[in-house]
Image (tube, rainbow, N blue to C red):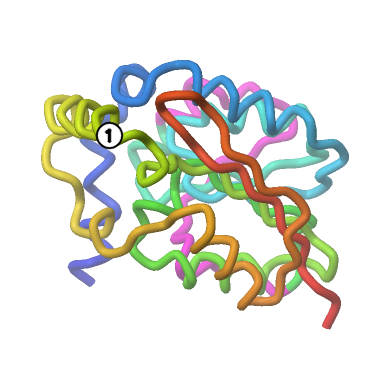
């Protein structure tokens, strides 16, 4: 129970200015590239977004989807997203735990998550839950910061900015390393074929993966 509470409350403290803080730490370029990559997708159908935060990616995601159920574990994040982006016609904001989803099996065409897999503390658990709620042939799209692929000096500088902006990382964020290769392998091990794997950014980097759930 305490682990869930830590995951639920850590980011809630930064709700009001989360987008500005994140941009300060990682820079605008890599964030913009993530949105641009997402806009290259088409016909994503009925989409579940995990870790939607303030709904920044939700606003982009709904342009390439029929409907979006945007979820986050934080009540504060959901309330903020609803207030700022609740006008979007094809979006519903709901509280949900990405590691224990209350949705049935095989109900979504696409699952999307941005900058969640590296902080949740159980990357495989999130991928397994995504597999469960996805229809056969459905897509899992993961966009995440690639800290280990940055240069040593840039990684150090970003680490200092992070500490000054957010403070000590959450316990979950330090549980495991999630590189592009490690997440690719988790996708393969859990019933996905890799359709797309790209590295984004110059100094600050992120990876963008798209996997298709294999037919049972």
Identified at 14% across, 33% down, the residue is 163
Reply above or below: 187 against 197: below
For disc 1, the neighbor class at 10 Å (few under 14, some 14 to 19, many from 20) is: some
Q: Is residue 177 above or below residue 150?
A: below
Percent coordinates x, y for residue 149 in the rendering: 42, 42
Residue 30 visible in the displayed image: yes
Q: As drawn, is 98 to the left or to the right of 18?
A: right
Q: Which residue appears farthest toward the bottom when viewing the image?
A: 216
Is 7 in front, or is 171? 171
Q: Tell me the SS state at disc 1.
A: helix
Q: Nearer the viewer, residue 167 or 211?
A: 211
Locate residue 166: give its quadrant.
top left
Name the image quarter holding the N terminus.
bottom left
Q: Position of residue 16 (x, y in %)?
A: 30, 22
| Magenta stretch encompasses residue 213 | no
- Say which of 171 and 204 sits in front: 204
Instruction: From the viewer's side, name the closer residue of 42 and 144.
Output: 144
206 sits left or right of 107 in the view: left
Q: Residue at the front extreme?
A: 152
Residue occupied by mark 1: 155
Query: Which quadrant: the C terminus?
Result: bottom right
From the viewer's perspective, is 79 left or right of 30?
left
Q: Position of residue 115 (x, y in %)?
A: 45, 42
- Residue 195 occupies quadrant: bottom right
Q: Is residue 188 above or below residue 55?
A: below
The span shown in magenta is 80-105
- Please count the marks in the image: 1
Identity of the residue drawn at 56% across and 20% down: 32
Q: Residue at x 53, y 59 (%)?
A: 181
């Amino acid at each position: 129970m305490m682990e869930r509470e830590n995951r639920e409350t850590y980011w809630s403290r930064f709700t009001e200015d989360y987008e500005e803080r994140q941009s300060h730490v990682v820079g605008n370029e890599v964030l913009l590239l993530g949105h641009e990559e997402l806009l290259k997708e088409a016909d994503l159908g009925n989409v579940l977004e995990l870790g939607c935060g303030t709904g920044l990616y939700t606003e982009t995601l709904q342009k390439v989807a029929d409907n979006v159920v945007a979820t986050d574990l934080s009540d504060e994040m959901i309330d903020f997203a609803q207030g700022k982006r609740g006008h979007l016609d094809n979006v519903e904001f709901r509280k949900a735990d990405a590691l224990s989803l209350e949705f049935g099996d095989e109900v979504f065409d696409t699952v999307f998550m941005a900058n969640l897999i590296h902080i949740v503390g159980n990357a495989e658990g999130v991928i397994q839950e995504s597999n469960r709620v996805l229809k056969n042939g459905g897509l899992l799209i993961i966009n995440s910061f690639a800290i280990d692929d940055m240069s040593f000096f840039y990684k150090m500088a970003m680490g200092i900015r992070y500490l000054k902006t957010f403070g000590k990382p959450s316990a979950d964020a330090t549980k495991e390393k999630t590189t592009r290769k490690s997440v690719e392998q988790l996708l393969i091990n859990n019933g996905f074929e890799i359709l797309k794997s790209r590295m984004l950014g110059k100094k600050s980097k992120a990876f963008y993966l798209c996997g298709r759930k294999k037919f049972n």
